[in-house]
Each structure stands twice: as structure tokens, then as C-alpha cells.
Amino acid sequence: MKDMIQDSAYGALTGPTELTIRRRLPGPAERIWRYLTDSELRRKWLAMGDLVPEAGREFTLTWRNDELTDPPGEKPEGFGAEHSMACTVLEAVQNRVLAFTWGTGSEVRITLEPKSDEVLLVLVHKRLMDRGSRLGVSAGWHAHLDILAARLAGEAPAPFWDSWASLRAAYDARLPE
């Protein structure tokens, strides 16, 4: 399937209901793994929630996007202060692979591949059944991964909500109807 966009900073549709995002991050993989699995580190870029990296283990992700950056930016209408979602670990290979359900409808698989002093993170989000979910997930993962990259580089991330809104508009222009 043709990528929805050519710019590698953006995610691409790699199937009719599948989004793939690739990011080179400062390593090592063990450090990034901790940001994926440790609730206190994950809450700094995505969502909190105790996660035991073993297949079959259930966990809850809880987003508080207003707390991700200072300032948080202007929150769009319709978003609350907190949102939670039940997930289940599907696969976990320490420092290499973390796969989990995304609520009840889709799945996320994150792989880490060392590349010299960097790590290639590949995130694949499957079963995004409609354009609205593809749009929201594309902008959301992109914005959250921007924060992760900034945190790993020791930089201050841009205001989350402003980034998310800008990315949502960019993906809206790029996603096929």
C-alpha cells in the first residue's frame, strides 16, 4: 500500500487499517524499554499505568495530557482532564518488543532495534477501522513520540496540545478519504 505521506517524520499507512511510525531515538534500547514499561517514566511522554511485561498481563493506561508539558498548550474542546483504557500485553521481549491490545478494538506493537548509538523504534498500530480513528491515532502517537524523543534528548518538549492540534491538521490533509 502506498504511504499516506512521504516525509519520514510522519506515520504511514502500511495497510488499509494499519499505521506505522518509525523514529530514531538516542539509545541504548534498555533506556527506551524503561520509558515503555515503567509507569513513572511512561507518564512523562504518554500515559501512566502499572505494566508487567509478560504476555497475558492486563494493565490500564491513564492519560493526563495536560501534565505532559509545561505549558500544556490549548486543549481542544471535548477532551477531559483524564482518560483511561484497559489493555493486555500480547508479547514482551525485554529491550526488543512490546505488543499490547489498545482497548478492545486494536493492537499496538513496538519494536526496538539498536543502530549504533541510536535505537530505531517502530510502532505499528493495527485495526484502525475508520478514518476518524486513523486520524486521531496518527496525530496522537506522533505527538507523544515527539515528547519521548525530547525527553530522551534532555530537551523541553513543545506544548502537547498545540503540537497535537497542528499534527491532527497535517494528518487530516494527508490521510486518504
Image (cartoon, rainbow, N blue to C red):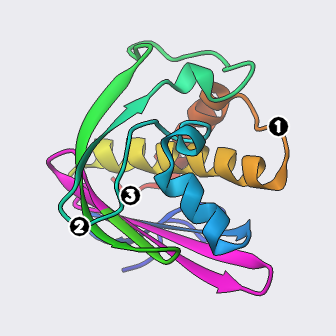
Secondary structure under tag 1 reads: loop
Of the numbered discs 3 and 2, the one sitting upstream in the chain is 2
Residue 121: in magenta span: yes
Question: Which picture quadrant has residue 101?
Answer: bottom left
- Frontmost of labels 3 and 2 is 2
- Frontmost of labels 2 and 1 is 2
Q: What residue would you read off at disc 1?
A: 156
Give the amino acid type for the residue marked by disc 3 in the picture. Pro
Question: Which picture quadrant has residue 155?
Answer: top right
Q: What residue would you read off at disc 2?
A: 55
In this view, 110 is above or below 72: below
Residue 107: in magenta span: yes
Numbered marks: total: 3
Residue 17: percent from left, percent from top: 26, 64
Provide the residue span drawn in magenta: 100-128
Distance from Cα at disc 2 to Cα at disc 1? 34 Å
4 and 141: which is toward the camera:
141
Identify the residue at horizontal 27%, vertical 35% (top origin): 85
Give the amino acid type for the residue marked by disc 2 in the picture. Ala
Distance from Cα at disc 1 to Cα at disc 3? 33 Å
In this view, 37 is above or below 83: below
Image disc number at residue 176: 3
Give the amino acid type for the residue marked by disc 1 in the picture. Ala
Whether pointer 3 and pointer 2 mark residues with C-beta atoms closer than 8 Å, the reply is: no
